[in-house]
């Protein structure tokens, strides 16, 4: 025997109704089945609305017509698609039922009130009608049917609108019915009968409870709950679209899911199935071949220790405090829970501070006024005499819970949960763990709920690691980066990295797509875009509206203005990656502020390409400093462009011509004077000095310029390039003198142990490691406490769009360490 229950959406129209019939037939071929039906979707709500409108004296005609229309369309569809369906008889039956409803409503209108017993009779009509329609449909398909009348066979105790079934007596009553093995059994959900035979309603999710009751009474091998989703997911699909379908959960886990807001079975339904050890399967009517989710007594924490994340929105927290709250009032928690229970108020969450000076609990916002009134009454004397402070109420809260049997044994779950929320900048207001140790719950602000759920789900469940990029600047480096990202799509996918370029921001326009821009055609789309350049507020809106969880701003410009916004970017929740040296070479105050904000906001500020382009210079220096090393001396060729230019000087090429070649190859800055003035090298040297712990400003760097002051004052870059040949002879003479001594000229930066920094032209001989460094290479020699007298030497190409873009790409991947809380 197998019990199948079909919810409102499963029987909402003729197409779905016929699909349900096919599922019933297929199941009946394997073993006998008993079917429990809910009312069609919206019918019960319509009936409740009709009652309230009648009490209020409002017009109910349109609502009644809407309810009747649902049944009329259902019958019309069945008559068209099912030969032999008795359309006339069913239409007449529906007309009779709605006449009865209208007669009841007349009495309600006269009384201006509706007793619960009458309300129960009106509400149950949807299920009652559906059973007769399903019976007629199955008979038209040549099936024999036995209908169990729940008012006669299910004994209910309790309130008219919220009753419970006496399983022992109901089992005795049902067992007295002679039901042929081949018959399909039908029973209306939601309803039962009192000892006196009065109609009783089983309350919220009553049809599910009816199915569990029938399964228990008939000793069913399984109870299937058919709905409009494939089963139980790790998270609400509306909030986390990539939530995972669970193959199985335990009864206890299902209870936790239900209690903390998941749209699953009601706790008492699960409890009944657990009591009688009835396996339950949640399945999708529109996708019957999907295996669904099994709820049973089996626990598989080894395979999947965490089963899901649930939430409850629109909660309020009441906080009761006082200096001697726990010392003088040991039973305060019991009094709170008892008074709330007596008032019919559900306490969802309760926690006590470690200092024992206050206790907090959460209730639904709909029960806020009643809860406050109950607390005022319960502790009236304590408030009056100052033993307790009056309760503080915090509104617009949400409860976020992680659920799984594995929480009892895996200590890392709590750490990952809290770390995820911290990294997402979600403020945790209160924390509690269930007594069964199958759930951990936190109270957060309503506005943080979706992003909190997505980040926690990403860390606990997803093998994919998400990066959402907003690129500012599509010059040489920016364009090369986009090309590399596009080319590496397959590699990223194999590494389970979901990298989306969500924004490309150019000088006058921008291209924004929170779901990812097609990099195969980004240039055309950017040209055709009507969106103006985005500012920080616009980007924050995109992130919040789309709940992006790992946004990264990449600045591939040389803009001082953008560099000055990095603090704001970090504070807003973005990682910042940049080859732009302007931020790190601004004032020492701003340099420190960047790092403080990055730490506080749990975001990364990555700039490895500031020095050495694709060479891991800064990363290695940071690693040395973190390990307790101390810089004794540094010297290096820090400019790929000047390395290239000075290499060409060795070959007899004039300075101006060498600069033109370097500029065409993309080795120089947009304005070559940034290189030739020595300012670019000075900036890089300052960054290294600061990373090594020296507190310096840019003006503290001594620079030997390559070009005279009069050339620096030329405002136009192209005009400057025309005048550059004026100094070719000066360098030709210097090169010749160096060659006479068997040496070559190199442009180097030096940091002394005292912190003195200098950028200069140096003559080096064949014994110097810099002698052979040219063609755009960088070479850096670090003499430190650990590396002395032989230095740590890094050498490689330090200029070029592709190399710099590769370094930025590496920094992008370093943002993924946030997932591990590193």
Image: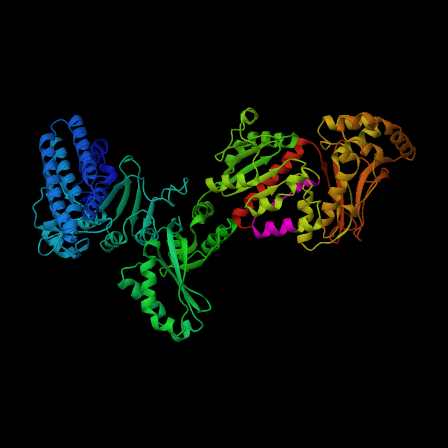
The percent coordinates of residue 352 (x first, y second) are 41, 65
Residues shaded magenta: 593-611
Residue 676 lies left or right of residue 176; in this view the side is: right
Residue 496 lies left or right of residue 670; in this view the side is: left
Question: Is 598 included in the stretch rendered in magenta?
Answer: yes
Question: Is 397 included in the stretch rendered in magenta?
Answer: no
The percent coordinates of residue 118 (x first, y second) are 14, 50
The percent coordinates of residue 49 (x first, y second) are 22, 44
* Res 221 visible: no
The answer to which of 494 and 453 lies nearer the viewer is 453
The image quadrant where one finds the N terminus is top left
The answer to which of 125 and 791 lies nearer the viewer is 125
Type of colouring:
rainbow
* Res 712 visible: yes
Which of the 4 quarters of the picture holds residue 320?
bottom left
Judge whether 714 appears above or below 2 on screen: above
Which of the 4 quarters of the picture holds residue 322?
bottom left
The answer to which of 38 and 380 lies nearer the viewer is 380
Judge whether 767 appears above or below 476 on screen: below
Looking at the rendered structure, the number of numbered marks drawn on it comes to 0
Residue 314 lies left or right of residue 192; in this view the side is: right
The percent coordinates of residue 195 (x first, y second) are 10, 56
Q: Which residue shows up at 54% across the image and 34% down it?
A: 503
Judge whether 794 appears above or below 300 on screen: above
């Amino acid at each position: 025997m197998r019990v199948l229950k079909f919810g409102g959406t499963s029987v909402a129209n003729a197409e779905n109704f016929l699909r349900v019939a096919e599922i019933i037939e297929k199941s009946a071929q394997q073993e006998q089945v008993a079917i429990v039906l809910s009312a069609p979707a919206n019918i019960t709500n319509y009936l409740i609305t009709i009652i309230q409108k009648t009490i209020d004296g409002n017009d109910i005609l349109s609502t009644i017509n809407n309810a009747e229309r649902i049944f009329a369309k259902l019958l019309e569809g069945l008559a068209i698609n099912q030969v032999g369906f008795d359309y006339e008889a069913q239409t007449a039956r529906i007309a009779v039922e709605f006449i009865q409803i209208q007669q009841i409503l007349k009495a309600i209108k006269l009384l201006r009130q509706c007793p619960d017993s009458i309300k129960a009779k009106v509400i149950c009509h949807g299920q009652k009608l559906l059973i007769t329609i399903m019976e007629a449909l199955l008979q038209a398909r040549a099936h024999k049917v036995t209908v169990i009348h729940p008012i006669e066979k299910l004994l209910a105790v309790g309130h008219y609108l919220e009753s419970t079934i006496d399983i022992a007596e109901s089992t005795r009553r049902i067992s007295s019915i002679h039901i042929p093995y081949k018959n399909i059994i039908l029973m209306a959900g939601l309803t039962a009968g009192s000892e006196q035979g009065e109609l009783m309603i089983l309350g919220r999710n009553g049809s599910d409870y009816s199915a569990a009751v029938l399964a228990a009474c008939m000793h069913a091998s399984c109870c299937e709950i058919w709905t409009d989703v494939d089963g139980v997911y790790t998270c609400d699909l509306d909030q986390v679209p990539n939530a995972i379908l669970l193959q199985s959960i335990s009864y206890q886990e299902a209870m936790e899911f239900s209690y903390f807001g998941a749209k699953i079975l009601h706790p008492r339904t699960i409890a009944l199935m657990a009591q009688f050890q009835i396996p339950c399967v949640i399945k999708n009517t529109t996708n019957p071949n999907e295996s669904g989710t099994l709820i049973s007594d089996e626990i598989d924490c080894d395979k999947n220790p965490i089963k899901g994340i649930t939430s409850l929105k629109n909660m309020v927290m009441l906080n009761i405090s006082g200096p001697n709250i726990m010392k003088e009032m040991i039973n305060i928690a019991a009094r709170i829970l008892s008074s709330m229970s007596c008032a019919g108020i559900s306490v969802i969450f309760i926690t006590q501070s470690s200092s024992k000076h206050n206790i907090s609990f959460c209730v639904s916002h709909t029960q806020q006024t009643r809860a406050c009134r109950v607390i005022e009454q319960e502790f009236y004397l304590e408030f009056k005499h100052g033993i307790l402070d009056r309760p503080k109420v915090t509104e617009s809260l949400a409860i976020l819970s992680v659920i799984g049997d594995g929480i009892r044994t895996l200590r890392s779950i709590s750490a990952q949960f809290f770390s995820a929320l911290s990294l997402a900048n979600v403020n945790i207001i209160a924390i509690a763990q269930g007594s069964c140790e199958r759930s951990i719950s936190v109270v957060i602000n309503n506005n943080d709920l979706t992003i909190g759920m997505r980040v926690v789900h990403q860390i606990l469940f997803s093998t994919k690691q998400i990066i959402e990029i907003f690129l500012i600047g599509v010059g040489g480096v920016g364009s090369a980066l986009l090309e590399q990202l596009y080319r590496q799509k397959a590699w990223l996918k194999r590494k389970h990295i979901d990298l989306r370029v969500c924004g490309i921001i150019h000088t006058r326009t921008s291209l924004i797509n929170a779901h990812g821009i097609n990099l195969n055609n980004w240039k055309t789309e950017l040209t055709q875009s009507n969106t103006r350049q985005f500012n920080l507020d616009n980007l924050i809106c995109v992130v919040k509206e789309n709940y992006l969880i790992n946004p990264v701003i990449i600045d591939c410009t040389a803009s001082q203005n953008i560099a000055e916004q990095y603090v704001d970017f970090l504070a807003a929740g973005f990682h910042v990656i940049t080859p732009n040296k302007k931020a790190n070479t601004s004032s020492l105050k701003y340099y420190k502020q960047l790092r403080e904000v990055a730490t506080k906001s749990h975001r990364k500020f990555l700039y490895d390409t500031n020095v050495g382009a694709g060479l891991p210079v800064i990363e290695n220096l940071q690693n040395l400093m973190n390990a307790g090393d101390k810089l004794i001396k540094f010297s290096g060729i820090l400019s790929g462009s000047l390395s290239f230019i000075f290499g060409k000087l060795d070959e007899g090429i004039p300075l101006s011509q060498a600069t033109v070649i370097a500029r065409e190859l993309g080795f120089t800055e947009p304005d070559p004077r940034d290189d030739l003035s020595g300012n670019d090298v000075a900036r890089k040297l300052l960054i290294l000095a600061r990373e090594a712990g020296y507190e310096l400003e840019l003006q503290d760097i001594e620079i030997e310029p390559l070009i005279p002051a009069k050339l620096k004052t030329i405002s136009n870059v192209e005009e400057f390039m025309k005048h550059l040949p004026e100094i070719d002879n000066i360098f030709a003479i210097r090169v010749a003198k160096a060659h006479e001594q068997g040496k070559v000229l190199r442009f180097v930066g030096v940091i002394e142990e005292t912190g003195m920094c200098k950028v200069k032209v140096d003559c080096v001989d064949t014994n110097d490691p810099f002698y052979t460094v040219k063609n755009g290479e960088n070479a850096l020699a670090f003499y430190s406490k650990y590396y002395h007298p032989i230095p740590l030497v890094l050498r490689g190409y330090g200029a070029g769009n592709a190399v710099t873009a590769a370094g930025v790409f590496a920094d992008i991947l370093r943002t993924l360490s946030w997932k591990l809380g590193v």
